[in-house]
Amino acid sequence: MFEEVRQRPCGRPTKSGAPCRAQFSGPGFACKLHTTDHERALVEAYQKGLETGWAQERDWSQRAATAQIERLERQIRTLRDELDAKSRRFQIDGDQVVTVDGYGYRWKGPGTLEVGDRVLLPENYVSALRHGPGPFPGTVTELGTTYTGPLSTIVSRAPAAPRQSS
Ligand SMILES: [Zn+2]
């Protein structure tokens, strides 16, 4: 009765005794005229329940999708960290290896560098364009590097970054 959606005859007895021939569709018991208040209330409650159910289902599948994405992201992070840990070099031929602003460098000393230390880097093609000729400053951003190619050597330590006067 509630699942029935297509047009169907009411069939309730009329004053003359013949079944009502009015058609109705959707969830319900009878045509508008023959539906009792109690039945109307039932139908309304049913429709409201359906809507709530759908809304909840949408909400649920959305939350499930979000949780799934977060799980995958966590997995990727873990795998990347594992790979990183395996391939990361902290020393080459006795030289300390650090990452400065995203690029790997060797450090021959004196002492060891820490994250946040300011250093002067040897001129390269890009730095020459950006900063002009000669060493240019950088900041140690990581200890070690995952870069596997040859590394340049840091020129020297540099004084702390000048305070921005703006
Ligand atoms: Zn009827």
Image: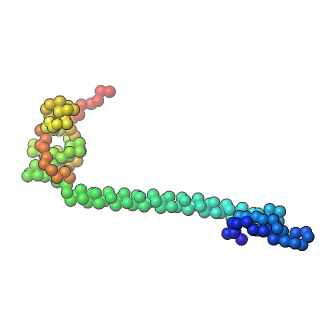
Color style of the picture: rainbow
**Left or right of 163: which side holds 13?**
right
Position of residue 44 measured from the top left corner of the image (x, y, whole percent): 72, 61
> Which quarter shows the C terminus?
top left
On screen, 62 above or below 118? Answer: below
Position of residue 104 measured from the top left corner of the image (x, y, whole percent): 18, 46
- Residue farthest along the top direction in this orientation: 165
Residue 43 visible? The answer is no
At x 37% / y 60%, what residue is drawn? 72
On screen, 8 above or below 108? Answer: below
**Left or right of 159: which side holds 28?**
right
On screen, 157 above or below 47? Answer: above
At x 22% / y 40%, what residue is drawn? 139
> Which quarter shows the N terminus?
bottom right
Closer to us: 66 or 19: 19
Closer to us: 8 or 42: 8
- Residue farthest along the right direction in this orientation: 16
At x 19% / y 57%, what residue is drawn? 87
**Left or right of 83: which side holds 47?**
right
Q: Quadrant of residue 155?
A: top left
Position of residue 152 measured from the top left corner of the image (x, y, whole percent): 13, 44
- Residue farthest along the left direction in this orientation: 93
Position of residue 112 measured from the top left corner of the image (x, y, whole percent): 14, 46
At x 54% / y 58%, what residue is drawn? 59
Q: Quadrant of residue 3?
A: bottom right
Query: Total marks drawn?
Result: 0
**Left or right of 54: which side holds 13?**
right
Residue 154 visible? The answer is yes
